[in-house]
Image: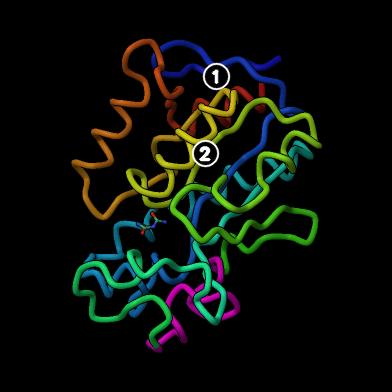
Amino acid sequence: MIKILARPFPFLCEPRSTALVIIDMQRDFVEPGGFGASLGNDVTRLQAIIPTVRALLTLWRQAGALIVHTRESHRPDLSDCPPAKRNRGSPSLRIGDVGPMGRVLVAGEPGNQIVEALAPRASEIVIDKPGKGAFYATGLHEMLQARSITHLVFAGVTTEVCVQTSMREANDRGYECLLVEDATESYFPEFKAATLAMIAAQGGIVGWTAPSNQVLSAFLS
Ligand code: C5J
């Protein structure tokens, strides 16, 4: 059992039953010309967490523990993209439109790939999710249950959208969840701060948060 110094109190877990879940570290969110940029966002904020997420990935690989990567991703015929999602707002590029990195948020396109520094290995689970949450229409819960996973450590983007949605879905399914504070980012710093605060509030109503140095030192001690 390891003990991570976290908010609102220490997070206890066994590496063999604790998966690292890296949410949507895709070129479409992190690089210019993708979905995030098409919504008018500054993507450089998100690029800054790549080294920290990579450190967690390396730690989990060394521990031989389970790693899950997610991609927000739609079928080429967009049959899994509700019109309500595709048509909302006025982005410069909609889901399925052709941009500088291929069709936006479409499976198999260059922009839909996870950034090179965090590229999944063959032994790691990769989830293509049509929604913001990692559990909706993916079979992730069944995959985790088959591997006796009880605890999830989250990283990735964006904090208040796909990360928070996935963490809430996981919490409702009975997982103990921790979000690594400096391994997640938002286009809006105030939304990240609010998300971290609301997760750990009320005795950890959604779960725990901790900085990456506490996760690393707990695993390495
Ligand atoms: C968004 C995500 N923000 N991965 N997706 O649309 O957070």
Residue 185: x, y in percent?
35, 48
Look at the image and give the residue range highlighted in magenta: 98-115
In primary-sequence order, the first of circles 2 and 1 is: 1
Q: Nearer the viewer, residue 80 or 220?
A: 80
21 relative to 42, above or below:
above
As measured in the structure, the alpha-carbon distance from the residue carrying label 2 to the one carrying label 1 is 14 Å
Crowd class of label 2 (few under 14; some 14 to 19; many from 20; radius 10 Å): many
Give the quarter of the image for residue 31: bottom left
Q: Amino acid at mark 2?
A: Phe
Residue 217: x, y in percent?
58, 26
Please tell me whether mark 2 or mark 1 is closer to you in this view. Answer: 2
Side (left or right) of 39 relative to 58: left
Query: What residue does disc 1 label?
Result: 4
Give the quarter of the image for residue 210: top left
The residue under the point 43% across, 30% down is 211
Determine the secondary structure under disc 1. strand
215 relative to 102, above or below:
above
Q: Amino acid at mark 1?
A: Ile
The residue under the point 45% across, 10% down is 9
Determine the secondary structure under disc 2. strand
Say which quadrant the C terminus sits in: top right
Secondary structure, magenta segment, majority class: loop
The residue under the point 35% across, 65% down is 85
Q: Nearer the viewer, residue 7 or 130?
A: 130
Say which quadrant the N terminus sits in: top right
Side (left or right) of 188 relative to 171: left
Side (left or right) of 87 relative to 144: left
Count of numbered labels shown in the rendering: 2
Quadrant position of ligand 1 = bottom left
Q: Is residue 33 magenta?
A: no
Which numbered circle lies on residue 154? 2
